[in-house]
Image (tube, grey):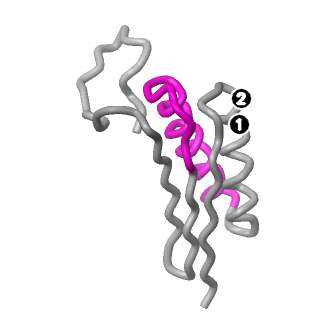
Amino acid sequence: MRMMKESREFPGLAQSVRAARTFVLECVSGIEPSSSDAIALMTSELAANSVLHAASSFVVSVELTDAEIRVSVTDEGEGRPEPRDSGPGDQSGRGL
């Protein structure tokens, strides 16, 4: 059974989004490209949200087993994400 858990902290800066994505892709190397593309997109979205809304450093954790891949992003921002309805002209609000 393959099992791995890695975490890394990133500063709350725009360039950290790319670094977080690269870190996660290195952790899951060898999986199907369609899966890694989806994981890269989700990681970018979560990291960007952290940079935009938390104004703090953030930690990206990757857990990999034979059955699943789990990526989490945590930060020191106040509050919790809340779903909202976005209109067709809104610039944001359609992410994760």
12 to 72, vertically: above or below: above
Instruction: State the residue position of label 1.
Output: 18
Q: Is residue 37 magenta?
A: yes
Disc 2 element: helix
Q: CA distance from mark 1 to mark 2?
A: 6 Å
Report the magenta stretch's main SS: helix
**Kind of residue at disc 1:** Arg
Q: What residue occupies the far top of the structure in this picture?
A: 89
Marks 1 and 2 close (CB-CB < 8 Å): yes
Task: Work out whether residue 90 or residue 72 is closer to the camera in this orientation and state it.
Answer: 72
- Residue 65 x/y as whole percent: 55, 79
Disc 1 crowd rating (10 Å Cα; few below 14, some 14-19, many 20+) is some
Instruction: State the residue position of label 2.
Output: 15
Q: Quadrant of the N terminus?
A: bottom right
Q: Quadrant of the C terminus?
A: top left
What span is in magenta? 33-59
Count of picture labels: 2
